[in-house]
Image (cartoon, grey):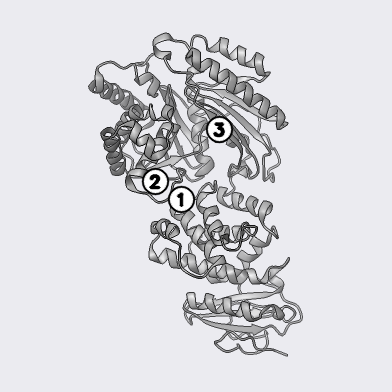
């Protein structure tokens, strides 16, 4: 295929693609252990080993080498000789690493350069002889489909257009309702664009023509554009630098068309050496940014998306997604990741779910998206307990804002981080955190503090069955919070617990009430009422004595 080749398009396959059947047939499987992918691209070769919470990829191993297999391909029709040697050495290393990890599930895929180069089959045979591994050379439509599945790994509800740029090609796919529909590939990779004649004017004309052909294939009614690929991530990192954006996490970074145009102008006005020095982007990657910038400028102009997102998930995550049974795909990536982190790092795995049930009456009126973040906070509330007490709050914040968590936008990361931070501290924000907190509104910041104080109070009753302790009840119209303690566990409510309950009530601008259940046993029925109580009854009928005073001191029912 030369630089003027028309786009190739294909409807999604109904078969399993690379795999005849999902790796795990058991729909209750919560993890895929050590699933490895060697991705042989036109510019880079990478080994990723996924481990742990499969629905939200955990990276057990991740190494990349910019080999440049596709450099010079347009002129010669062959792989770069230097790129071949570098890629061969890299893949041999990766194969040995996989062998050392005793990995039973390893997939090697190759894309544009390998499928189109004259010496691609020869190099493929050489690699397979070196390593004993099968190299699967996929076509452009399959590459587009897998990249789009990678986006669905991080955004289950994503709807719009996925654009994956590599060294030698660029793929588009339409996603929505958890499905990939149209897939199309083109020759808009930077290596190919280096050979377009006619200077900047000729380049613009060439890119514009190809993009309009692509638009005819996939349509232009896409409000959201999801960008996949190292060149797009480099441009997003430059956008952050120009804007002074406080959170340097590329996944789910959102840009507007206006911001992108300003950044692309800024890139044109500065030398690549200066930009590389400011951002730490590698020289090999930075060399492709000017051409990728031209494609992005016209991509945004031709398709006119309202929102543009960066995805760190692509073909490798798409291969993992390929192996998930439908029941696993349907799970929430954020909750799956938080559950895995709790299981591996918390002192009492499983307590997070009980804590959420205990605190839920306080937040019953919140929308589902907010309750989802509260649930995540409950799961993560104890994963940093090994950190030094002086830095534990900061460690909690960093866990939420820097960890590899899918299906969580940047505002959600900061919200979750501040909630977890206030689980361990009650004073103000450090300067570095205050800067990142600017991504939240004042109301969101106060809500995060409230959740943090609720976590701090709930953690006072850490035990194997939190429901044995008591129940929280919240009456927003009366601005009252009531703690109903079981008789057996009322001894847990002492001075420190009382202080934390008062702090929570003050944060919620509510009056604290405390009662002790008269019943010998105690169970939570999910309504916030104690055993034998009419659901939601503030009088506590059937529960014993009247409420304690506003100081939060419990009154005995005996």
Q: Residues within 10 Å of mark 3 (few under 14, many from 20)?
A: many
Q: Which residue is painted at 75% across and 79% down in the image?
A: 488
Numbered tag placed on residue 254 in the rendering: 2
Spatial CA span between label 3 and label 2:
22 Å
Residue 316: give x, y in percent of width and height: 55, 32
Do callouts 1 and 2 mark residues in contact (Cβ within 8 Å)? yes
Q: Which residue is painted at 64% across and 20% down in the image?
A: 134
**Quarter the N terminus occupies:** top left
Kindly identify which residue carries mark 3.
Answer: 316
Whether residue 34 sits left or right of residue 257 in the image: it is: right
Do callouts 3 and 2 mark residues in contact (Cβ within 8 Å)? no
Tell me the SS state at disc 2. Answer: strand
Whether residue 527 sits left or right of residue 76 in the image: it is: right
Numbered tag placed on residue 409 in the rendering: 1
Q: Residue 139: in sight, yes or no?
A: yes
**Quarter the C terminus occupies:** bottom right
73 in relation to 224, above or below: above
Q: How many marks?
A: 3
Q: Which residue is painted at 64% across and 50% down in the image?
A: 340
Upstream in the sequence, badge 3 or badge 2? Answer: 2
User: Picture quarter containing residue 431?
Assistant: bottom left
Asked whether 486 or 262 is in front, the reply is 262
Tell me the SS state at disc 3. Answer: helix
Spatial CA span between label 1 and label 3:
21 Å
Q: Residue 365: in sight, yes or no?
A: no
Residue 119: give x, y in percent of width and height: 52, 9
């Amino acid at each position: 295929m030369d630089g003027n080749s028309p786009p190739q398009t294909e409807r999604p396959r109904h078969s399993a693609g690379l795999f005849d059947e999902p790796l795990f047939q058991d729909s209750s499987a919560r993890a895929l252990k050590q699933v490895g992918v060697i991705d042989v691209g036109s510019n880079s070769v990478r080994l990723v080993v996924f481990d742990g919470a499969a629905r939200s990829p955990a990276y057990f191993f991740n190494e990349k080498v910019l080999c440049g297999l596709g450099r010079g391909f347009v002129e010669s029709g062959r792989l770069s000789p230097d790129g071949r040697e570098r890629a061969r050495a890299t893949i041999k290393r990766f194969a040995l690493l996989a062998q050392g990890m005793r990995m039973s599930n390893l997939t090697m895929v190759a894309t544009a350069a390998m499928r189109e180069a004259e010496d691609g089959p020869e190099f493929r045979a050489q690699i397979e002889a070196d390593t004993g591994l099968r190299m699967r050379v996929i076509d452009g439509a399959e590459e587009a489909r897998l990249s789009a599945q990678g986006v669905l790994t991080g955004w289950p509800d994503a709807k719009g257009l996925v654009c994956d740029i590599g060294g030698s090609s660029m793929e588009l796919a339409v996603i929505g309702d958890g499905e990939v529909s149209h897939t199309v590939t083109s020759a808009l990779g930077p290596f190919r664009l280096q050979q377009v004649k006619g200077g900047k004017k000729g380049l613009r004309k060439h890119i514009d023509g190809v993009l309009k052909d692509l638009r005819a294939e996939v349509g232009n009614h896409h409000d959201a554009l999801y960008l996949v690929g190292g060149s797009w991530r480099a441009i997003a990192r430059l956008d952050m630098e120009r804007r002074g954006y406080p959170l340097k996490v590329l996944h789910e970074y959102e840009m507007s068309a206006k911001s992108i145009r300003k950044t692309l102008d800024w890139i044109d006005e500065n030398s690549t050496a200066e930009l590389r020095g400011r951002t730490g982007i590698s020289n090999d990657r930075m060399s492709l940014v000017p051409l990728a910038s031209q494609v992005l400028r016209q991509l945004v102009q031709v398709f006119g998306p309202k929102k543009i997102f960066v995805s760190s998930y692509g073909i490798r995550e798409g291969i993992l997604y390929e192996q998930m049974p439908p029941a696993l795909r349907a799970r929430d990536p954020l909750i799956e990741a938080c559950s895995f982190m709790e299981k591996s790092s918390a002192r009492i795995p499983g307590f997070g779910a009980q804590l959420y049930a205990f605190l839920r009456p306080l937040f019953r009126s919140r929308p589902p998206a907010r309750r989802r973040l509260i649930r995540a906070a409950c799961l993560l509330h104890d994963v940093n307990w090994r950190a030094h007490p002086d830095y534990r709050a900061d460690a909690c914040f960093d866990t939420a804002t820097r960890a590899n968590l899918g299906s969580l936008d940047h505002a959600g990361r900061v919200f979750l981080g501040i909630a977890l931070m206030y689980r361990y501290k009650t004073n103000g924000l450090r300067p570095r955190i205050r800067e990142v907190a600017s991504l939240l509104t004042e109301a969101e910041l106060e809500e995060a503090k409230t959740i943090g104080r609720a976590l701090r109070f709930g953690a006072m009753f850490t035990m194997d069955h939190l429901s044995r302790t008591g129940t929280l009840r919240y009456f927003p119209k009366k601005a009252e919070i009531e703690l109903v303690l079981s008789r057996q566990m009322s001894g847990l409510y002492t001075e420190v617990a009382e202080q934390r309950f008062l702090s929570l009530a003050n944060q919620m601008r509510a009056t604290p009430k405390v009662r002790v259940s008269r019943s010998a046993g105690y169970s939570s029925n999910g309504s916030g009422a104690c055993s034998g109580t009419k659901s939601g009854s503030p009088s506590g009928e059937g529960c014993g004595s009247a409420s304690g005073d506003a100081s939060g001191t419990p009154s005995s029912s005996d």
